[in-house]
Image (cartoon, rainbow, N blue to C red):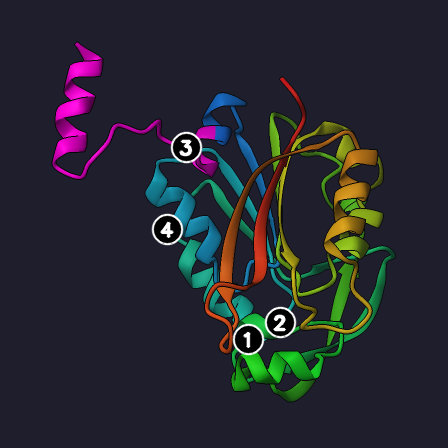
């Protein structure tokens, strides 16, 4: 019967295809109840999880003072969503972050010329002193089935370097990885894959985040979901 239905659909230009797993499917399958949202900005990622039906705890880290205030407002009515005004990194320290016109581009790393070509709003308009803490210490008391999201504009390797033994308790990681380097001194896609493999993770899903302004089929960055094999 399925073959007959498929033939009829194909005759009209349609087909039956298997639905591809999404992030929410991973969270549900691994029974994730703790999401650590590093580089939260105003909470866009956490809000998207809530829309998808995730009801567990979320801890969002955002270092920029003005952006953090908006993040606090966005999570105020959600008892399972906590915001912390801090950056995650390799060592406990203070650091200077370049504040971009569009704050999603703000980074401890310097932007490259490719960033300006991609989006003029990536330009730096200010500098701010921020707190940096190691995830191993910040998340020492977090228990449960943990998922880690890192979106730190080129600072992902440093976040992982400061995670230490915390990573042993993490079941999945999502990171935005570069096809084109918008920031100086960041790892390559191959280096990121090798680092995640060394931590015991396998690439599960990959999704383009944005595309080149001059080459519409060439991605700039990819959201990569890594998981521990079940």
Taking the spot 50% from the left edge, 66% from the top edge, the residue there is: 211
Please tell me the numbered disc located at residue 64.
2
Query: Where's residue 80, x and y in %?
Result: 46, 40
Q: Are marks 2 and 1 in contact (CB under 8 Å)?
A: yes
Q: Which residue is mark 4?
A: 77
Tell me the quarter of the picture where residue 193 sits.
Answer: top right
Quarter location, residue 66? bottom right
Distance Cα–Cα, label 1 vs label 3: 32 Å
The residue that label 1 is drawn on is 103
Residue 183's x, y, as percent?
72, 72
- Mark 3 and mark 2 lie on one chain; the one further toward the N terminus is 3
Q: Residues within 10 Å of mark 3 (few under 14, many from 20)?
A: few
Q: Which quadrant would the N terminus be assigned to in this image?
A: top left
Which callout, 1 or 3, points to the residue nearer the camera?
3
Q: In this image, 23 relative to 15: left or right?
A: right
From the viewer's perspective, is the residue at label 2 or at label 1 nearer? 1
Secondary element under disc 1, as helix, strand or loop, is helix
Across the whole image, how many numbered discs are drawn on residues?
Answer: 4
Label 3 to label 4, Cα distance in Å?
A: 33 Å
Q: Which residues are magenta?
A: 1-25
Against 167, residue 158 (above or below) is below
Q: In the image shown, does 6 or 28 lie closer to the viewer?
A: 6
Picture coordinates of residue 140, whole percent (x, y): 76, 37
């Amino acid at each position: 019967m399925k073959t007959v239905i498929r033939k009829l659909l194909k005759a009209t230009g349609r087909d039956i295809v298997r639905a591809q797993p999404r992030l929410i499917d991973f969270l549900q399958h691994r029974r994730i109840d703790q999401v650590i949202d590093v580089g939260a900005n105003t909470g866009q990622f956490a809000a998207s999880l809530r829309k998808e039906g995730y009801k567990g705890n979320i801890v969002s880290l955002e270092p920029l003072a003005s952006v953090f205030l908006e993040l606090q407002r966005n999570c105020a009515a959600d008892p399972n969503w906590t915001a912390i005004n801090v950056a995650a990194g390799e060592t406990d320290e203070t650091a200077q972050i370049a504040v971009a016109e569009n704050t999603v581009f703000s980074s401890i790393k310097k932007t490259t010329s490719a960033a300006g070509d991609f989006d003029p709003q990536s330009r730096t308009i200010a500098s701010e002193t921020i707190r940096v803490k190691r995830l191993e210490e910040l998340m020492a008391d977090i228990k449960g089935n943990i998922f880690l999201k890192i979106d730190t504009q080129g600072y992902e390797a440093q976040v992982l370097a400061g995670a230490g033994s915390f990573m042993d308790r993490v079941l999945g990681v999502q990171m935005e990885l570069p096809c084109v380097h918008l920031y100086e001194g960041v790892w390559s896609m191959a280096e990121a894959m090798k680092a995640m493999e060394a931590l015991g993770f396998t690439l599960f899903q990959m999704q383009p985040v944005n595309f080149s302004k001059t080459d519409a089929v060439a991605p700039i960055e990819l959201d990569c979901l890594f998981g521990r094999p079940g």
